Image (cartoon, rainbow, N blue to C red):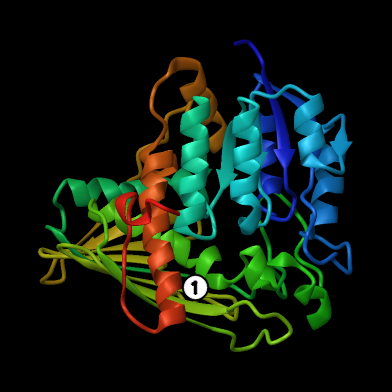
Amino acid sequence: MDKFKVGIIGFGHMHINNVAQLYADRPEVQWVACADTVPANPELRKAPYTRAWNQETLMAKLGIPKSYDCYQEMLDKEQFDIIVVTSENAQHADIVEACAAKGINVCVEKPMSVCLADAMRMVRAVRAAGTKMVINWPVTWTPAVRTMKRIIDDGVIGRPLQVKWRAGHTGPLGTGAHHTGVSQNAAPMTGPERAATWWHQVKAGGGSILDFCCYGAMLSRWWIGEQAVSAMGVRTNLDSQYGDADDNSVIVAQFPSAMAIFEGSWTQWDSAGIPAGIVYGTQGTAVLLSSATGQFVRACLGAGKTQDFEDEPLPADRDTIAADFIYSLRTGEPVHQTIDMDFNLEVMAILDAGVRSSLSHKTEIVQNWASNYNA
């Protein structure tokens, strides 16, 4: 296939500004059309990173020729090879089912969905249609994150016993927020203006537990190398009472031979130099650190001994979500494990258990196909 006809459904997630550009950078990509989803509540303002601003900016920047008010109408009238899905989380399953029915491959922004039942709907639809689905994790394309996996697998710190992951900022549309792919920072917004965005609405899939703890679920599953068995979750709204979604959250996951803690915060003004990721092993500790030139991994091996690890460059033809997905569609080769559909079903199962626990206030079992047979 010389050209891949690509479209976009959903401009609610500001990551589309980065993801769409990555597709635009591929010479094989031909933009066809785009459509936003219809939000439960209309936004009150067009400002950097809001859905109307994202769509207007990208259509002008990338020259996307058409837009539709209804994505189903777009799917009926246009032909696509790939649809990039960057809608509010709660609409992922409906969109993927609609695309699968048309034989279209999908690239879905993290997290996979709002719950395991929706994730299973997505997988069933894709398998029945014989199409492909990937889940984009921005951290997948960070070399240091892959270096952490490599030194764990090489036994540098022994067997992993505990993973800690923390992600935090002032909120998706918070003061000074900046997202990859756009030069502007978020503009100051009032409480009601933020409340009108899906990010602060539970039913739309908003909240820090889905936005940020999802990273911990993915990385711990990947770094530890086994599936979790149970999880405990806590989520709360500490300083965003204009919306009903959580702005701080924690999940503690139990694995057969390890444990993990994921933290997400939309009220964090500064990281204070605290590492985002730490893996404690039987023979040492590996830390994901930041420097002026980016992130790197340092292993602390006891007795004051430390070792910094150089990153291996990402494969030139598979160094972005767009490049890896197109390469896989063209060659039939598997995509990177972290964006693989079946792997992400396990990630979603961990996140789902943490969300359920935050509601039940009990430890919840990490479920699977068998325990969700009627979902």
Q: Residue at x 74, y 84 (%)?
A: 242
Q: Amino acid at mark 1?
A: Gly
Q: Nearer the viewer, residue 19 or 145?
A: 19
Q: Nearer the viewer, residue 148 or 221?
A: 221
In this picture, residue 316 sits left or right of residue 204: left
Question: At 77% across and 50% down in the image, what residue appears?
Answer: 37
Image quadrant occupied by the C terminus:
bottom left
Residue 268: x and y in percent read 57, 79
In the rendered view, would you say 164 is above or below 240?
above
Note whether residue 371 is visible. yes
* Residue at the farthest top position: 2
- Marker count (numbered): 1
Q: Residue reaching furthest front? A: 374
> Where 161 falls versus 108 (above or below)?
below
Query: Seen in the image, is 162 located left or right of residue 20?
Result: left
Image: 249 above or below 164: below
Q: Residue at x 58, y 38 (%)?
A: 107
Relative image position of residue 108 (x, y in whole percent): 57, 44
Compared across the picture, whether 235 is left or right of 109 comes to left
Q: Position of residue 215 (x, y in %)?
A: 45, 60
Label 1: how many residues lie within 10 Å, few (<14), some (14-19) or many (20+)?
many
Q: Closest to the observer: 6 or 370?
A: 370
Asked whether residue 319 appears in the rendered view, the answer is: no
Location of residue 44 (image quadrant) = bottom right
Q: Quadrant of residue 290?
A: bottom left
Image quadrant occupied by the N terminus? top right
In the rendered image, residue 175, in percent from the top left (x then y), is placed at 72, 75
Judged from the image, the secondary structure of the residue bearing numbered disc 1 is strand
**Relative depth, front residue between 75 and 280:** 75
- The residue wearing badge 1 is 264
Where residue 102 sits, quadrant-wise, is top right
Residue plotted at (39% across, 74% down)? 251
